[in-house]
Image (spheres, rainbow, N blue to C red):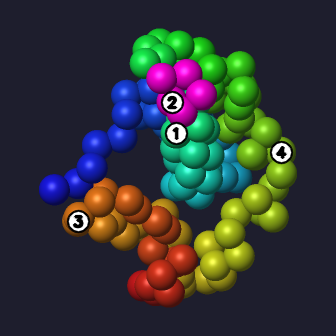
Amino acid sequence: MPRQLPSPIVRYLTELEIAAKQLDGIVPEDILVDAREHLTRDMQALQVSEPGIGDGDVYDHFLSTFGAPADVAREYQSLGPQAAPAASRVRGVAPGWRICCTRCGRSAPAARAGITR
């Protein structure tokens, strides 16, 4: 059974995806993979340093640490094509496609696994 992400991470990623889809020149999946890794690590560290912290406080921490999702998306866009993983810049490597582990729920761009279409 896929492991569910904590709600502050889901909320931040949802807002980030909406912001990223409104901008040209970025693939939302690329930014979401990067953000998910950072948010997960940050939340784990926060829960160790502040046991029992509430979801609202965790989300506020994300905003103060990483910035508003719309600002993060614009920053990612300003980095241009070099922000995308090298595999996603190669023609035919399934841009936008994802693979997902059915046990833990983690996902990654299909291009990272060498999947082409």
- Label 3 packing within 10 angstroms: few (<14), some (14-19), many (20+): few
Residue labelled with disc 1: 44
Please name the amino acid that badge 1 sits on: Gln
Q: Earlier in the sequence, mark 4 or mark 1?
A: 1
Q: In what element is the residue under mark 2?
A: helix
Q: Earlier in the sequence, mark 3 or mark 1?
A: 1
Q: Which residue is mark 4?
A: 78
Residue picked out by circle 2: 47
Circle 4 SS class = helix
The answer to which image quadrant residue 11 occupies is top left
Q: Can residue 44 be seen in this snapshot?
A: yes
Contact (Cβ within 8 Å) of mark 2 with mark 1: yes
From the image, state whether disc 3 or disc 2 is nearer to you: 2
Q: Please tell me which of labels 4 and 3 falls first in the chain.
A: 4
Q: Are marks 3 and 2 in contact (CB under 8 Å)?
A: no
Relative to 79, 44 lies left or right:
left
Q: Is residue 73 left or right of residue 32?
A: right
Q: Residues within 10 Å of mark 2 (few under 14, many from 20)?
A: few
- Gap in Å between the C-alphas at discs 4 and 3? 34 Å
Which circle, 4 or 2, is nearer the viewer? 2
Q: CA distance from mark 2 to mark 1?
A: 5 Å
Residue 86 coordinates in the image, percent (x, y) = 71, 76
Front one among 72 and 45: 45
